Amino acid sequence: MSRFTLPPENVLRAREKLVLDHFHDEVRQDWDATLATFPHPHYELIAPMTVHDGDGAVRAYYHDTRVAFPDQDHEIIAFRHSVDAVVVEFWLLGTHLGPLGRIPPTGSKHRTRMTAYFIFDEHENLVVERIYFDQLTVLKQLIGGLDKRDPRDLIKLGRAVLGLLATAGEAPDPRLLGTTPPPFLSAYEEK
């Protein structure tokens, strides 16, 4: 298929249903149903440069994010189709009630704009959910709700900063570093 030709409408509708079911099942925390949308679960989080690959790793990711934000939800902003993907812009919402990696809970709410690419292979299998967002936007909201005059909140703020610094030193997943330009770029470079 040409990179300029969208698949037929029935394929786009099937992709759309799968992605919407995926979102719905995540909110319901029905992990079996969510994982069933992939033949092999695979998430790539571009901001922290992490990969969650396989059933166990993705379930651990779900567990950790729902411990941090038990009320996690979303609001879809836009839904777009491409030749091999569905692109969804959405607000991710949640209250920080548990540890987020090494950042202790602050009790603050966040509402963060994100984009997720649901990429399909040539057999129409969902092969990756690749998520782009700004980590600083999340962090600013999590610590922004703390009262800087309350000693207890100052301790939370200090622990959050230490947790952030510890996280910032983690090496990026090498699977996200080995990118190659698309083949059509060579034609432009020759001119």
Image (cartoon, rainbow, N blue to C red):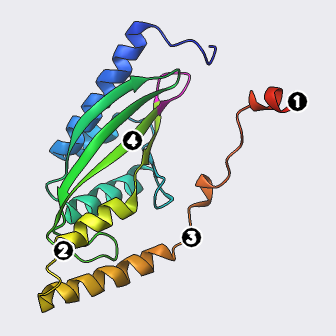
Q: Earlier in the sequence, mark 4 or mark 1?
A: 4
Distance from disc 2 to disc 4, alpha carbons, whole Å, reads 25 Å
N-terminal-most mark, 3 or 4:
4
N-term mark: 3 or 1 = 3
What's drawn in magenta, residue-wise? 119-125
Q: Are marks 4 and 1 in contact (CB under 8 Å)?
A: no
Residue that mark 3 sits on: 171
Of the numbered discs in the image, which one, if any, rests on residue 190?
1
Q: Nearer the viewer, mark 2 or mark 3?
A: 2
Callout 3 touching callout 1 (CB < 8 Å): no
Main secondary structure found in the magenta portion: loop
Q: Which residue is mark 4?
A: 115
Percent from the top left, x then y, of residue 151?
Answer: 14, 92
In contact (CB < 8 Å): disc 2 and disc 3:
no
Q: Amino acid at mark 4?
A: Thr
Check disc 2: other Cα within 10 Å, few if <14, some if 14-19, many if 20+.
many
Q: Secondary structure at mark 1?
A: loop
Residue pictured at 40% horizontal, 16% vertical: 12
Q: Reading the chain from its start, which is encountered first: label 2 or label 4?
A: 2
CA distance for labels 3 and 1: 35 Å
Q: Quadrant of residue 187?
A: top right
Residue ranking furthest to the front: 149
71 within the magenta span: no
Dot 4 falls on a residue whose secondary structure is: strand
Residue on which the image places disc 2: 106
Tell me the kind of residue under disc 2: Thr
The mark lying in front, picked from 3 and 4, is 4
Q: Residue at x 21, y 89 (%)?
A: 155
